Image (tube, rainbow, N blue to C red):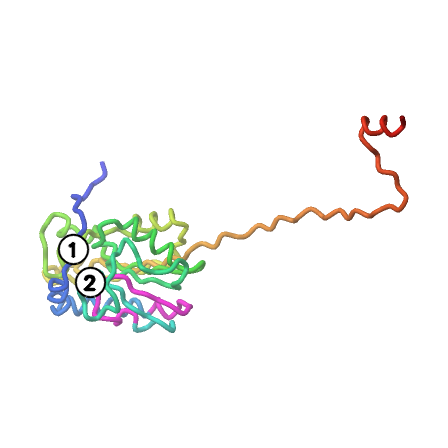
């Protein structure tokens, strides 16, 4: 029998709650860990335009290691660090206009994750890449949140998504998962136990698959040459009339 976690609908966190969490000791530590993990990923991405979708982090700190020419943050709530406030399920971006998109815990607070991923697929270029940062729902944090035992280590109201499920969703949109990084976070109230450092965080990197183009050879054109003096056959009716 497969264990099922209680289902809770994700909701957008408000800016005040996010600020309180990011200002806490644990919040600062986790953001520093995630920034360190992204330093191993973002410099390998090439292109001109990279966006972060979601308010996680303060400004463009998570994008600091990106080598792309233009980087910006599009948030979903009032945040002075974001370049614009948007509706996550309707990205105000042109189709095939962005080379890479970072989703730091955005999938955990969006009402319709499938719709967001479809929008990400739409705006990414042919070989565009998406980077998803999240927490494992089967970690100590995830189990506490799933059963409603909130802790100051993580902002409330989010719904954690597992790596396997996210990779399946990306595969359905023709994304290829190229890399998965997992990092551990120490839990203070388990610090003396052997399994104190749980594999709680992950970074998924996925690239859009390029559909190979099949070239169909056109049939050779037949050149019609005019034959001087050649008689043109007429239909039966006209031929009889001409002979009479």
Q: Quadrant of residue 240?
A: top right
Is label 1 in contact with label 2 (beta carbons under 8 Å)? yes
Query: Residue at horizontal 11%, vertical 64%?
Result: 16
Residue for badge 1: 141
**In the image shown, does 10 or 204 lie closer to the viewer?**
10
- What secondary structure is marked by label 1? helix
Please state the total of marks drawn on the protein image: 2
**In the image shown, does 17 or 38 lie closer to the viewer?**
17
| Residue 91: % across, % down | 30, 57
| Residue 78: % across, % down | 17, 64
The answer to whether residue 24 is left or right of residue 121 is left
| Residue 50: % across, % down | 35, 67
| Residue 137: % across, % down | 21, 51
Query: Residue at horizontal 13%, vertical 67%?
Result: 19
Instruction: Answer whether residue 34 is magenta in the image.
Output: no
Q: Is residue 174 above or below residue 231?
A: below
For label 1, the crowd category at 10 Å Cα-Cα, with few meaning under 14, some 14 to 19 and many 20 or more, is: many
Q: Is residue 194 above or below residue 65?
A: above
- Sequence-first disc among 1 and 2: 1
**In the image shown, does 180 or 1 lie closer to the viewer?**
180
Quarter containing the N terminus: top left
Q: Quadrant of residue 83?
A: bottom left
Magenta part of the protein: which range?
40-63
Q: Main secondary structure of the magenta part?
A: loop
Instruction: Answer whether residue 42 is magenta in the image.
Output: yes
Query: Residue at horizontal 29%, vertical 54%?
Result: 90
- What secondary structure is marked by label 2? strand
For label 2, the crowd category at 10 Å Cα-Cα, with few meaning under 14, some 14 to 19 and many 20 or more, is: some
Quarter containing the C terminus: top right
Whole-number angstrom distance, CA of label 1 to CA of label 2 = 10 Å
Q: Residue 185 shows which numbered tag?
A: 2
The answer to whether residue 158 is left or right of residue 64 is left
């Amino acid at each position: 029998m497969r264990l099922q976690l209680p289902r809770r609908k994700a909701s957008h966190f408000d800016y005040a709650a996010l600020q309180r969490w990011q200002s806490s000791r644990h919040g600062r530590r986790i953001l520093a860990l995630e920034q360190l993990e992204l330093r191993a990923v973002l410099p390998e991405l090439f292109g001109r335009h990279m966006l972060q979708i979601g308010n996680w982090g303060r400004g463009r700190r998570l994008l600091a290691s990106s080598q792309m020419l233009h980087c910006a943050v599009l948030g979903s709530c009032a945040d002075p660090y974001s370049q614009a406030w948007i509706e996550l399920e309707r990205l105000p971006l042109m189709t095939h206009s962005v080379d890479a998109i970072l989703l730091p815990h955005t999938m955990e607070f969006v009402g319709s994750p499938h719709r967001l991923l479809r929008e990400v697929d739409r705006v990414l270029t042919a070989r565009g890449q998406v980077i998803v940062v999240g927490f494992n729902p089967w970690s100590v944090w995830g189990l506490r949140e799933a059963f409603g035992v909130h802790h100051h280590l993580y902002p409330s109201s989010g719904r954690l998504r597992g790596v396997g499920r996210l990779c399946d969703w990306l595969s359905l949109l023709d994304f290829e998962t190229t890399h998965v990084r997992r990092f551990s976070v120490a839990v203070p109230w388990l610090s003396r136990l052997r399994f104190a450092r749980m594999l709680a965080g992950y970074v998924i990197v996925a690239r859009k698959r390029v559909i190979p183009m099949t070239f169909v050879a056109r049939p050779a054109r037949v050149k019609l040459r005019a034959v001087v003096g050649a008689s043109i056959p007429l239909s039966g009716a006209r031929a009889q009339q001409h002979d009479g």
